[in-house]
Image (spheres, rainbow, N blue to C red):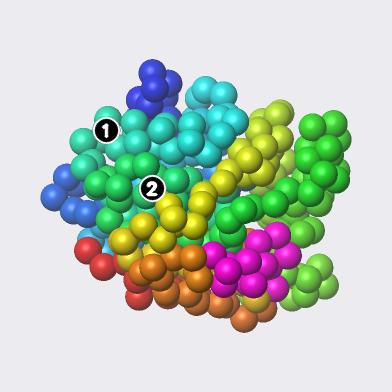
């Protein structure tokens, strides 16, 4: 499905269903150097169970036009413009990694537009090491390797994939390799710069779900737990053995967590 957002064509995956204004909407927000495809299972389920499921490619990512944004706030404003153009007054937001920061920022700055949020692989702040940032700016292939290795649970390096004959890490490498030049560096810059103080976090009153992976090396479960302690109306679920790329490593468990939280 195509939207026009900030005068640029944007691609939005809808799970195989047409948009229906009578249904509630859930917006899936991908992370650094990713696109809508990380949400295929989850978006498709909700699209066939009473929701408008909208998984956009952020600007400069996937099939969307324009340049990648260099701040979380700019990505948030872009998504709000997408909702405006779809005449969607309010939506539930599900964000992964960088997308979780966008979901939090949207909730803080556009409170009437957000009904509930699910944060997957989240931490505030979201540190980006100098080594990774330097590689993203100057050696992007090395940065892709770093993100892919750190972005998966350690046991996956030895071929322990849920589906026989597949490699989650190889799929992750391919996905990162498809991102456009410079996009990873811009996304990491946005993550690194994002801040939200305790008062702003505590003032968020809508229901919040945090899903953490016990083997997440990029946004460790302890960081997710620290974030949960700063929020008021929050539920936290930790997925055993899952790393940062939870939607691919434990797709069914992520879906089950969302099914138990998102209610029309």
Residue at (48, 36) in percent of width and height: 73
For disc 1, the marked residue is 84
Q: Where residue 245 sits in the image (x, y, percent)? A: 63, 61
Q: Quadrant of residue 50?
A: bottom left
In the rendered image, residue 219 lying in the magenta stretch gets the answer yes
Mark nearer the viewer, 2 or 1: 2
Above or below for 132 versus 237: above
- Say which element carries label 2: helix
Q: Where residue 74 sits in the image (x, y, percent)? A: 48, 32
The outermost residue toward the top is: 7
Q: Residues within 10 Å of mark 2 (few under 14, many from 20)?
A: some
In the rendered image, residue 12 lying in the magenta stretch gets the answer no
Q: Residues within 10 Å of mark 1 (few under 14, many from 20)?
A: some
Above or below for 105 versus 63: below
For disc 2, the marked residue is 108
Residue at (57, 72) in percent of width and height: 225
Magenta segment:
215-227
Q: Where residue 14 sits in the image (x, y, percent)? A: 35, 47
């Amino acid at each position: 499905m195509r939207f026009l957002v900030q005068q640029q064509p944007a691609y939005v995956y809808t799970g195989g269903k047409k948009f229906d204004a009578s249904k509630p909407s859930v917006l899936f927000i991908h992370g650094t150097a990713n696109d809508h495809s990380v949400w295929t299972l989850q978006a498709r389920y909700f699209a066939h169970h009473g929701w408008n499921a909208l998984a956009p490619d952020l600007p400069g990512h996937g099939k969307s036009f324009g340049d990648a944004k260099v701040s979380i706030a700019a990505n948030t404003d872009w998504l709000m413009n997408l909702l405006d153009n779809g005449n969607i007054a309010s939506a539930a937001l599900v964000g992964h990694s960088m997308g979780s920061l966008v979901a939090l920022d949207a909730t803080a700055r556009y409170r009437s537009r957000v009904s509930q949020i699910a944060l997957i692989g989240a931490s505030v702040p979201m540190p980006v090491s100098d080594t990774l940032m330097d590689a993203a700016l100057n050696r992007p292939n090395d940065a892709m390797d770093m993100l892919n290795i750190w972005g998966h649970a350690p046991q996956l390096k030895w071929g322990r994939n849920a589906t026989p004959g597949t490699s989650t890490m190889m799929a992750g490498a391919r996905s990162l390799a498809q991102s456009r030049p410079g996009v990873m560096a811009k996304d990491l810059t946005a993550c690194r710069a994002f801040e939200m103080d305790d008062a702003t976090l505590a003032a968020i009153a809508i229901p919040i779900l945090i899903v953490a992976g016990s083997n997440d090396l990029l946004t460790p479960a302890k960081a997710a737990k620290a974030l949960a302690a700063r929020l008021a109306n929050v539920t936290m679920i930790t997925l055993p053995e899952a790393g940062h790329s939870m939607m691919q490593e434990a797709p069914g468990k992520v879906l089950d967590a969302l099914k138990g939280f998102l209610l029309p």
